[in-house]
Amino acid sequence: DMYSRSDLDYTQKQLAEKQTLLQSTTTQITKLEKILGGIEKDVTNLMTSANEAIQQVKAAEDEYLGPFREKTGVQDLQAYEEAMGKSRAEFNTKKRSIMEHITKLEQQKAYEVGRDFEKPIARCQKRLEDGEAKLKKIQQREKELIEQVNVAKEELAEAEETWKEACNKEKELDEQVRTAQGKFSEAQAERQRVKKLINTEESTLERLRGKLHETLQKARVEEVHLPILDEEKDENMIEEEEPSARSARASHRSSKTKGAGDNDDSSSAEEHTPQEQLTQQTMTQETRFSQPEDKKVVKDRNQAEKIDFDSLPSKLKQRLSDREEKKARKEFEDRLTKLAADIEGMTPNMKASEAYESITERVKESDADLKKSKKESREAMAAFNKIKKQRSKRFNDAFHHIDEALKTIYTDMTKSSKHPLGGNAYLSLDDAEEPYKGGMKFNAMPPMKRFRDMEQLSGGEKTVAALALLFAIHSYRPAPFFVMDEVDAALDNINLRKVCNYIRQRSESDFQCIVISLKDIFYENSQSLVGICRDVGTNSSRTMTLDLTKFDKMKGGNHKRKSSSSSAASVGGESSMSVGGGADVADDNDDNEHDEEDTTSTN
């Protein structure tokens, strides 16, 4: 392929350059070896001359300095000269320091002899007299200050005594205040406790008043005979009943008279009418049971005083708790329910046959509805299973098609001359029998690499795998148009050229494509270029286009030959490349056809 030929040309060029460099280096090494041989001969001659000169110097020393050595006993004249020079330098240094010290002492002596001591002595005497005068004044001032300090100490002692007495009084007052505050807090707590008790009792009393009113009202409406202490007072109480209670009782009587000849349903409805009227009457009338002087409260209290409670059991005459009251109320309600049931059982049901026929008809209708519902349920289940089967079949068809296409596409996008088999990619389901209950995994193995999770692959490897999956999905339901936005950002040149070649091949038959890119390889293989830049004059964006097909026509037959053999030729079919961001757009010179490609650019 084109990449292999480009790589071979580049390697051959590099090899030729290295061979030329090797020849020039070999020539230079030969010249330098000759020069080095001459220099080594010169060095040998110079070393011989130096040794001869040293021997001559030693012979001269022995000839001229031999008698001196025998007389002094010095064998090394150089060490002797160094020792003598060092002693001479130390002597000169000491002599110089002594002379400097003598000069310094003579100058100091002359200075001391020439000094005048009378004026400084006079000045010192004057300062002494002034100091004695100031000392007397200071001593006098000190005596005055000592007297003032003594007076201040006496006043301070008196003030401290007064302060201590005030502190003692303050402590006593603080103790009294704390005691009063404690008593006040206790009184406040007691007041709050009593207030809470009063509120509780008032709430209980209000609730009892409401219950009393409700009980008396209910007794009047339902015509319950209450035992009265005095019959005359009872008659007066009956005369003083509210018109609403009388109307309710009258309607209750009329309902009983009228319900004797009606069916059971109408009689039960008429029996509940007074209760409904009582509820409406209770809702419409607002009785302020919290006010003991209210008219209704006073009336209820007067009526309650006339009731005879001697027939009640002793435990009900006492005040009951809420729990005991509920229990007693439940017992009475159970007894009433039982008595009502007994009374109802004594009354013969004249419409039992009609009710039986009606119920039999309803059972038949229900049975028919049940059969119809079962049939509809079976049909719905069959339709559901059919749709479920179709859904699973369609999903499995799409999954297997995409999986097979993915393996082929990923292998085509990753294979090369070094790796002719390419990589491997596949899809797997978590639940193959029920794919909708689980997820799906996508795994890709680049060439010559072991299995890894997708998270551990590099950015370029992830990009190639993602594009392979995209093209595999496209192969199942082809889309007529593709837009790719900088999919080459993480790709190197090798993978980029592979992706570009694959898109070029697919665009010849399957789809149209617009690629937004900043890589030159995409420009080379595009059919047209679109550049976006800034128009300074209008301060807005500007679009510039370049049709590359006209250059293909200009090349003629030579271009046709390249398009059939080189992957760097312009892409045929309907594909197109779009470049954004204001980048310079150019057709780069390819390694195999750099002398034949035309170069254009847009800003």
Image (spheres, helix red, strand yellow):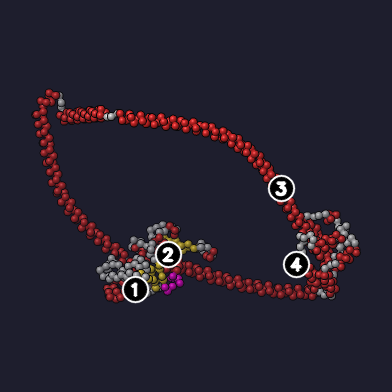
Image x and y of residue 224, in percent: 85, 65
Q: Which residue is drawn at the image coordinates 34% and 65% (left, top)?
A: 519
Give the residue at x 37% y 73%. 575
How far is the residue under mark 4 from the one under mark 3? 43 Å
Which segment did they paint magenta?
474-481
Q: Identity of the amino acid at label 1?
A: Thr
Q: Which of the 4 quarters of the picture holds residue 406?
A: bottom left
In what quadrant of the picture does the N terminus appear?
bottom left
Q: Say whether residue 522 is magenta.
A: no
Cα distance in 3D space between marks 1 and 2: 30 Å
- Residue 522 visible in rendering: no
Percent position of residue 101, x then y? 24, 29
Tell me, yes or no, whether the highlighted magenta stretch contains residue 475.
Answer: yes
Instruction: Please tell me whether mark 2 sits on a helix, a strand or a loop.
Output: helix
Which one is in front, 446 or 457?
Answer: 457
Q: What residue type is labelled 4?
A: Met
The C terminus is located in which quarter? Answer: bottom left
Q: Which residue is tagged 1?
A: 545
The residue that mark 2 highlights is 466
Closer to the eye: label 2 or 4: 4
- The answer to which of marks 3 and 2 sits earlier in the sequence is 3
Q: What element carries label 4?
A: helix
Q: How far apart are marks 3 and 2 (CA)?
A: 83 Å
